[in-house]
Amino acid sequence: MDSYKSTPHAIACDAATIYSKLTNPSLIKNLIDAHADQIEGEARQHLDAVKFTEDSIAIQSPMGEVALSLDRVNSVENQRVVYTASQSPVPINMVINLEPQADATTMSTAELQLNLPFFLRKMVDGQLQEGANRFGELLARIPFDRL
């Protein structure tokens, strides 16, 4: 399985709080809805293509809807949150690694894990790395302590 990791980002919140919020994606939807007027046009359009439920995230893509469900078996409390694609042409995992720090902050790394054919991997390699980096940056901006 190929892995694309973001650079680590510091989040000003403890790992337990972040874990509890990331394992309930409907809280993120509530935050987005509450601040919809502050989200720019293009970003808002991208968010309109995302649906959140209590334990899944569905994203509209050129290949159709990709549903990522919380993988409670492979998630590790306060350390790692794993979402697995249940409807995807290739196996996909979205992993958020959490590393608690002494000062009540958490280092996070976003990771996309895919099982791609070799010829396809070369075509999308850069885009997947950019996606992992953007996802990591997005995580660092979420005010987990206020969700």
Image (cartoon, grey):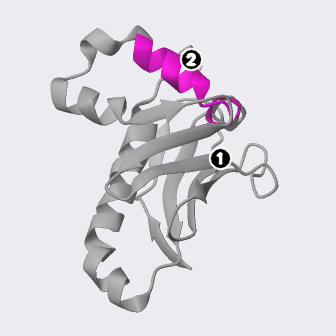
| Label 2, residues with CA under 10 Å away: few <14, some 14-19, many ≥20 | few
Q: Is residue 15 above or below residue 35?
A: below
Please name the predominant secondary structure of the magenta segment in the image. helix
Give residue 21's mark. none
Q: Quadrant of residue 60?
A: top left
Q: Which residues are magenta?
A: 20-33
Q: Which residue is mark 1?
A: 69
Q: Position of residue 44 (x, y in %)?
A: 27, 26
Is 143 placed above or below 67 here? Answer: above
Looking at the rendered structure, the kind of residue marked 1 is: Ser
Label 2 sits on residue:
147
Q: Is residue 38 left or right of residue 54?
A: left
Q: Is residue 72 left or right of residue 15?
A: right
Give the residue displayed 51% in from the left and 41% down from the top: 58
Under tag 1, what secondary structure?
A: strand
Q: Residue furthest right?
A: 73
Q: Quadrant of the C terminus?
A: top right
Q: Is residue 92 left or right of residue 124?
A: right
Number of dots carrying numbers = 2
What amino acid is at disc 2? Leu
